[in-house]
Image (spheres, rainbow, N blue to C red):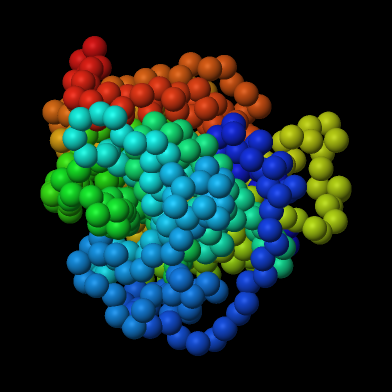
Amino acid sequence: MTFTHRLFTTGLSTLSVLALSTAFATATAVASPTTTDTAPGVPPSLAATDPTIGAPADDPFYTPPASIPAAPGSLIRDQFAPHLLAGFDQEDAPARADKILYTSTAQDGSPVATSGFVMEPARPWTGEGPTPTIVFAPGTRGAGDYCAPSRAGNLFASTDMAAGSINVNYEYPFYAMASAAGYRVVVTDYIGLGTPGQHTYVNHTEEAHTVLDAARAGLAFAGAAADSPVALFGYSQGGGATAGAAELAASYAPELNFKGVFAGAPPANLQDVTDTVDGSMGGNVLGFALNGAIARNPELAGLADMYFNDEGKAFLAETDDQCTFTIDTSTPDLSEIDPTDPMASMMFDSRELTTDGRSFGEIIREDADLRGVLMGPDYRLGDRPVDVPMFILGGTNDDTIPYGQTRQLAADYCASGASVTFLTDGSPAVLPGTGLGHAVPQANHTLQALDWLGDRFTGVEAASTCGG
């Protein structure tokens, strides 16, 4: 079954459109072997609800060893990673990058192996004190292991023709900018994205853990002091991850020396996000989120049989390992296109996937278990105070993450006593429903966000807009 949501997706920057076209020309085709062996190092509590976590990764680097260090942020292994800025095979060049496998923590407290990479500065840090580190939390890449940022060819782009997946590291230019500014860059793949198991998309608890542990592992790998200055950068899914990390930093990683956090368009309220994405071209993200929630919450095990028709079940199966970008070689069914409004024909409509015609949003409102998970502490933001300066960005015409919830998150953090710089992007609407309205604020303000983090590293006090 081919779904119209495969044509476009959310969580993209404008640069991703250029990167996508480049990827088609330069991508390396990779076939994914299959195996039925059992992977070692699998937490029993996770395997009970997520059998896929017991399957080894197709790349041995990502398969956990028989036992992993229990301490969060522990470095398990590393591997040189050629990439564009470092000149590919120049292992001793500035901006050298290395993949890392490290310990993080699932929502139930189980230790779990997570991957990512570390990129050294392209030029020496000229400021005072140790080299600063920026941990990047990626935007939406999908749910399949092949989609992980560290798995992209040369950390930029590659394709798996057999699976129809395209891995475009569309935020790579931002990593390169930070490296060129003299910062160490650490990028997390998140839990289950790269390593075995279901990726728990927009589970802010697990994403926060992987971001905080990436900081720990990245500093350890670089031989840097544990109290070296650290900042976080994330947009869309990444914005939710960095906001979640800001909320948990004091209790989960109190030793880290955080200077500032950028959280752009964070999905703080999945009820609102669901209502906004449904009816757009980016509906596959709802499949990513539901599959991740089911994998961690046994009370949701019967969700598919209870609410989804055959097409809906196929949607869940397709999105459980799908990348943001996919290759669809099937012949399009032109009978599904309304010639009077072809754009509307491409929009996702969850009511077509349920047994009774209710939308996903309506089901969330009416199913206490599902609502309890998606509106609970592992997914909702803003209910916990933060004690690090925050820069939050929202767009009035964002067609994926509603501006109102982003503004409310800033207000919630202000009410908790945090220093918050809130910026509104007022760009006009661009092809509503395509995700471009979501990408524009990121493209417009990434340099400003990096400059804001740079000011935090040099000791400039953040100007809070709370109350103003």
Rendered residue at 53%/17% (across/down): 427
- Name the image quarter holding the N terminus: bottom right
- Relative placement, left or right, of 379 versus 130 is right
In the rendered view, would you say 318 is above or below 384?
below
Quick check: can you spot residue 42?
Answer: yes
Pick the residue in front: 197 or 179.
179
Residue 75 location, x and y as percent?
29, 65
How many numbered discs, if any?
0
Rendered residue at 44%/25% (across/down): 447
- Relative placement, left or right, of 297 versus 417 is right
Residue 360 location, x and y as percent?
51, 50
Residue 51 location, x and y as percent?
44, 78
- Give the residue at the far bottom of this rendering: 37
Q: Where is residue 201, by image quadrant?
A: bottom left
Rendered residue at 52%/42% (across/down): 85
- Relative placement, left or right, of 128 versus 159 is left
In the rendered view, would you say 392 is above or below 271?
above
Pick the residue in front: 83 or 241.
83
Q: Where is residue 36, by image quadrant?
A: bottom right
- Name the image quarter holding the C terminus: top left
